[in-house]
């Protein structure tokens, strides 16, 4: 058996920033080498960021990716890191665009691997961009035969993992750009355990961490033994290098044969890895200099979702060049939770609240907004919108719903004006339940550059608020969300005495129905068979279908569910199909 010290680079990448991503590879490799790592494994499409979407169709972008790969290999050698094996994801061009991984050593690209299974469901469009690979490179490094795979390869039966078994590899590396969704980490682990048994090899699974538009990557990197035992697991939502020492079988140089259609190509590393001996200056794993990766405890559901929202918001704000955000603070639960997420993401002092009372605003709307801003430590500005509303209403002679919507649109215009003036990013406060059924005003409360709650059902918004307050109390801190914002009945306050319940069913029931209709694509009869009232199911499905045009204009927000609005769920706007038709 051979000992190999591996660093799992759970890192945050930025799409298109090849210079920053490559410099991160160099810096992290130097850090890993100082801790005695022989092999450093980075995520899928490290150099380009993931997903690059239509950038992958540009020859100039592909050429830049390949040039950057070779520049990184050269720079590693120039910085004295030639004897460290480095695995990075990048965009290649080989008879078509390729989602690729490279093994770098000795200042050169030793081997390349092209992703075999190209996902084309949910948020993935890889068939649009990439050509599938057909080879499995096996790199002999430090006396161990190592195979490379990428993300979706682990989600499909057979393929490179079966070929790896035939090649008798000792270690399989699986690099990932696997987006977060609730309960997905359990599925990932069970899949990798199956693949490890299938290949009869240790599997190192490395995933990126960070936000990219509506996607959030949660890390959750881990290592599984050939018999499926979980050996080590990184925490979610933490950017860091994690170290493992693996006891691996020595390379045999033989193949078990088999009838795999995948071609096995073998490579020998030109330089030996650094020796790991008792007399070396390498810090032992478990020391403060090179802590060994243990099995990190899992997060509770609310904690996991909260971290995803915070990370997605932080990266969207910062990667798009903003330093602050502005939010309409109505005193309600949605704006309070959005503000608390933003405060955790970028600091409460950078969360600018705007209270915009109209003739129908209650006293507690203002007082709860004031209390929220005080708890978060951010500024609050009050803008009385009544004169502006009256000017619109009287000039256009508006009544009823049209008059109600003017209030929301004046608020939206106010926020966008302050955004333009001061450089804040506007955060929309709508939740998935309201967005589903069209309970929002286009160009009103729907304005914004980012929507943290876009994929969060209303019932979960309350759960998150209670969880965040309880977490603060456990830490001896003041809860960030005023209790009255959680306890009071939700209302848009666009007419006297208005409540959400005037227009919508109970949110718990609505969210259960929407989970089946939106996330699982259940039809009317399936909803009725599941126990939902036919009239209610008909009404909600019609409201949801009719609101597609609004959702197309809603800002992006972090995906947390099986099926989020946007790239996850694509329905035609002009569409006469209705589930309730005879």
Image (cartoon, rainbow, N blue to C red):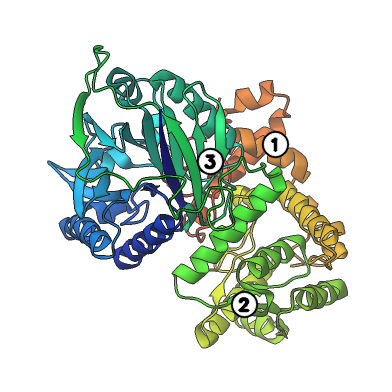
Disc 1 element: helix
Q: Quadrant of residue 73?
A: bottom left
* 135 to the left or right of 316: left
Mark 1 lies on residue: 512
Q: Mark 3 points at which residue?
A: 563
**Label for residue 426?**
none
Vertical order, 486 against 406 (above or below): above
Q: Position of residue 570 (x, y in %)?
A: 44, 43
* Residue lying farthest to the front in this orientation: 279
Look at the picture and state if 549 lies above or below 134: below
Question: Label 2, label 1: how many angstroms apart (C-alpha)?
Answer: 33 Å
Residue 330, x across and y down, in percent: 74, 71
Q: How far apart are marks 3 and 2 (CA)?
A: 32 Å
Q: Is residue 521 visible?
A: no
CA neighbours of label 2 inside 10 A, class few (<14), some (14 to 19), many (20+): many
Which badge, 2 or 1, is on the more N-terminal residue? 2
Quadrant in the picture for the C terminus:
top right
Secondary structure state at the residue bearing disc 3: loop
* Circles 2, 1 touching at the beta carbon (< 8 Å): no
- Considering only order in the chain, which callout, 1 or 3, is on the residue closer to the N terminus? 1
Circle 3 or circle 2, nearest the eye: 3
Query: Which residue is label 2 attached to?
Result: 410
Residue at 60% of width from left, 65% of height from top? 428
């Amino acid at each position: 058996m051979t000992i190999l010290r591996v660093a799992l680079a759970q890192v945050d990448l930025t799409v298109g920033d090849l210079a920053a991503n490559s410099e991160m590879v160099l810096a992290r490799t130097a850090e890993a080498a100082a801790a005695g790592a022989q092999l450093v494994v980075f995520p899928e499409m490290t150099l380009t960021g993931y997903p690059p979407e239509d950038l992958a169709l540009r020859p100039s972008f592909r050429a830049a990716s390949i040039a950057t790969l070779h520049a990184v290999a050269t720079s590693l050698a120039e910085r004295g890191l030639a004897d460290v094996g480095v695995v990075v994801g990048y965009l290649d061009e080989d008879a078509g665009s390729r989602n690729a991984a490279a093994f770098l050593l000795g200042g050169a690209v030793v081997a390349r691997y092209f992703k075999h299974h190209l996902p084309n469901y949910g948020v993935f469009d890889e068939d649009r961009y990439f050509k599938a690979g057909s080879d499995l490179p096996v790199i002999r490094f430090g006396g161990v035969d190592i195979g490379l795979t990428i993300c979706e390869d682990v989600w499909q039966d057979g393929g490179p993992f079966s070929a790896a078994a035939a090649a008798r590899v000792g270690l399989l590396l699986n690099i990932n750009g696997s987006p977060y969704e609730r309960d997905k980490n359990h599925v990932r682990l069970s899949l990798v355990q199956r693949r490890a048994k299938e290949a009869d090899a240790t599997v190192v699974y490395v995933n990126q961490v960070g936000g990219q538009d509506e996607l959030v990557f949660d890390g959750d990197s881990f290592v599984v033994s050939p018999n499926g035992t979980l050996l080590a697991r990184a925490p979610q939502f933490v950017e860091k290098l994690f170290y493992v020492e693996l006891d691996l079988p020595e390379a045999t140089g033989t193949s078990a044969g088999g009838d795999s259609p995948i071609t096995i190509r073998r490579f020998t590393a030109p330089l030996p890895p650094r020796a790991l001996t008792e007399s070396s200056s390498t810090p032992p794993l478990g020391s403060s200099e090179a802590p060994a990766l243990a099995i990190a405890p899992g997060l509770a559901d609310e904690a996991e979702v909260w971290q995803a929202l915070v990370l997605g918001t932080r990266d969207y704000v910062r990667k798009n060049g903003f330093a602050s955000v502005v939010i309409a603070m109505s005193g309600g639960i949605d704006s309070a939770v959005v503000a608390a997420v933003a405060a955790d993401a970028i600091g409460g002092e950078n969360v600018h609240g705007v209270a915009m009372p109209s003739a129908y605003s209650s006293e507690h709307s203002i007082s709860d907004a004031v209390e929220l801003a005080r708890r978060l430590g951010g500024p609050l500005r009050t803008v009385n919108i009544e004169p502006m509303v009256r000017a619109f209403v009287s000039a256009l002679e508006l009544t009823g719903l049209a008059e109600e919507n003017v209030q929301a649109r004046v608020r939206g215009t106010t926020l966008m004006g302050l955004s333009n003036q001061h450089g804040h990013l506007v955060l929309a406060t709508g939740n998935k339940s309201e967005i589903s059924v069209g309970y929002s005003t286009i160009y009103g409360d729907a304005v914004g550059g980012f929507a943290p709650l876009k994929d969060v059902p209303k019932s979960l918004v309350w759960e998150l608020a209670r969880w965040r307050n309880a977490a603060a109390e456990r830490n001896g801190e003041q809860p960030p969300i005023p209790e009255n914002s959680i306890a009071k009945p939700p209302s848009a306050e666009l007419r006297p005495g208005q409540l959400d319940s005037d227009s919508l069913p109970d949110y718990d029931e609505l969210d259960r129905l929407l989970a089946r209709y939106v996330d699982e694509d259940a039809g009317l009869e399936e909803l009725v068979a599941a126990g939902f009232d036919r009239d209610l199911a008909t009404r909600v499905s019609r409201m949801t279908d009719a609101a597609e045009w609004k959702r197309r204009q809603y800002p992006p927000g972090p995906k947390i569910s099986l099926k989020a609005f946007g790239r996850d769920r694509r329905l035609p706007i002009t569409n006469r199909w209705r589930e309730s038709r005879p």
